[in-house]
Amino acid sequence: MSQTGCPIGHNTRKSNYPGETLEGGVDVVDGVWQVRDMGVAREVLRSRETTQAGFNAEAINMGRLRKPILYADGEGHRKQRATIARYFAPKTVDSNYHELMEGYADQLVDEFRTSGSCDLSQLTLRYSVVVAAQVVGLTDSDTDAMGRRLERFFANPAIPPSQEGTSEKPTLRSRFSSIRMATLGQGPMLLFHFKDVRPAIKARKAKRSDDVISHLIDEGYTDLEILIECVTYAAAGMVTTREYIGMATWRLLEDEELRSRYLNAPDKAGRYEVLLEILRLEPIVGHLYRRMQAPLEVSVDGQTRTIPKGALVDIHIRNANADPAIAGDDALQLCPGRELPPRVGKEVVSFGDGGHKCPGNSLAIQEADVLLQRLLRLPVKLATKPGIEWDELIKGYEVRNIRLVLDRDA
């Protein structure tokens, strides 16, 4: 497929990783399969003959504990996903969480309107923690304090996957740290357990609720296993959604035409078209890793190649999302409404694909839309030039120094 051209281009990617190459294809570097082709990326992600190798999965020995959903594979993981999926289904999001999102977004925007300025990263931290807490069941403690505890926890170092599947020394701070080690030894995690998770478990043992913790109790999870799952959901629900809202705000405030298109869209589908195109171009997680448990034949430029058993596969999400064969020759332009092949979502593989595709994709987009509609209808502008920091483990970005002010003269 070759795109005929974006009718209205809205500038290129902001999140450019230093030294990043933009070519596609598949090659092998130091024994690691580097996949930049979207078709091959999706084949690997959908294969049932792989295991999770990202987010420190191979650096953590869980012992007798159950692996959290992020790390589990195989039939047990598929059953676990199937039972958890109902908490994140679009219908459930609409009926169970939409009113909460609207109410808390109104509160935060009212606070901003009164003060006239805000640090967006702190506003989105509070917002994303409240929504994630509702889904998970962490509703029996102070969510603002819980957010600060989790923020300190996710500043810990992590370990990227190695060719041999063993640990290597980390090079940068990472938001996805070694969950089991941190759970057993770190102050912020102990506080998270005693201040947030344990009260929630106690409340739900007395009376179940319609949330993840109640489900885990019914499945016989221990308190420590529930704590580890809560950290996993916090990483997905707090960290990634927070960064995405920051990037979307930045892009929409710097492009008045794009902002107008988003705010004046005739319906939710029109607004989502803008938000998902931003996510395609600016995926939060830049790399996903899989370990092959059996050989996999893939088609690369019309030729068949075999990824061997045991190989580590590094899937370049940012390259796959900008694959010209999928998104067109102008794939590095932001173009809501661009034509994509059948059965390719507008975000392409920003949420992953296959067995480990992010289950909270519907929640994340609705969450962002609810807040952005309210925030961007105000006469708001950027008071500072935002910057980007990088997470070495997943080549994911963190939007920093994004301060908003109200234009009182508008």
Image (spheres, rainbow, N blue to C red):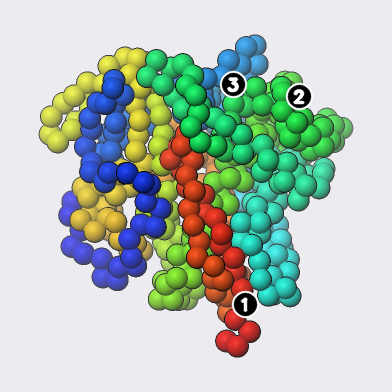
- Residue identified by numbered label 3: 67
Rendered location of residue 150, percent (x, y): 69, 41
First of labels 3, 1 by sequence position:
3
Residue 125, horizontal then vertical, whole percent: 65, 52
Give the distance between the C-alpha atoms of the residues marked 3 and 2, in whole angstroms: 14 Å
User: Regarding mark 1 in the picture, which secondary structure is present there?
Assistant: strand
Q: Is residue 178 visible?
A: yes
Q: Residue furthest left?
A: 302
Q: Quarter-wise, where is residue 99 in the image? A: bottom right
Considering only order in the chain, which callout, 2 or 3, is on the residue closer to the N terminus?
3
User: Going 59% across and 21% down the picture, which residue do you hit?
Assistant: 67
Residue at image point 13% right, 29% down? 303
- What x and y, as percent, mark residue 315? 35, 34
Q: Which mark, residue 56?
A: none
* Mark 3 and mark 2 residues within 8 Å of each other at the beta carbon: no
Residue position marked by numbered label 1 in the rendering: 406
Q: Residue at x 47, y 21 (%)?
A: 168
Residue 223's disc number: 2
**Of callouts 2 and 1, the N-terminal one:** 2
The amino acid pointed to by label 2 is Asp
Residue contact between numbered discs 2 and 1, judged by CB atoms under 8 Å = no
Q: Amino acid at mark 3?
A: Lys
Residue 290, quarter of picture: top left
